[in-house]
Amino acid sequence: MQFCVEHETLYRYSVPVGLAPHRLRLEPRPDAGQVLDRALWIEPLPVSRAVEADAAGNLSVIATFAGTTDQLRIVSRFVILTGAPPCLPAGGLPPLPWSPWADGPLSACLYEPQ
């Protein structure tokens, strides 16, 4: 399946402010599928941008700024092609494994479908 995702964040300030470094987590995971197109717009233009991956493989962009501004606008857009959804077995989904909460104080909130 192909997905197009667009996300916009806009902050407006009543007076000019200095911006701290921002960590933007707006990228698909590298193993989520084939990224066909990607764009990231940041206003005001950062003085530096770096891409990092955390221990779980999630990508983030670190943007640092200089000077002051009365607004911050971030627009992220990507198109991704994912694999086909898996087919369910004839009997439906298999039962879930035992939960560590099954015997705890929240056990009344859990139920087994009949």
Image (spheres, grey):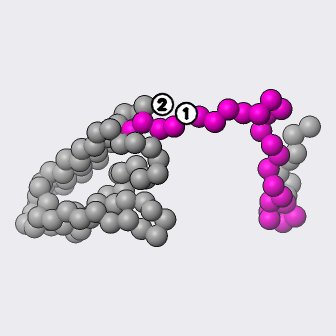
Task: Evaluate if marks 2 and 1 touch, with contact meaning CB atoms under 8 Å apart.
Answer: yes
Q: Which disc is residue 84 wearing?
A: 1
Residue shown at the point (32%, 38%) measured from the top left: 36
Q: Is residue 10 in sight in this rendering?
A: no
Q: Quadrant of the C terminus?
A: top right
Q: Is residue 57 in sight in this rendering?
A: yes
Q: Is residue 91 magenta?
A: yes
Q: Which disc is residue 111 wearing?
A: none
Kind of residue sitting beneath label 2: Met
**Few, some or many C-alpha atoms within 10 Å of disc 1 (few <14, some 14-19, many ≥20)?**
few
Which one is nearer the viewer's eye here, 3 or 109? 3
Which one is nearer the viewer's eye here, 2 or 114? 2
**Distance of label 2 from label 1 (alpha carbons):** 6 Å
Residue where numbered disc 2 is placed? 1
* SS of the residue under disc 2: loop
* SS of the residue under disc 1: loop
Q: Which span is picked out in magenta?
A: 80-104
Residue shown at the point (43%, 31%) measured from the top left: 2
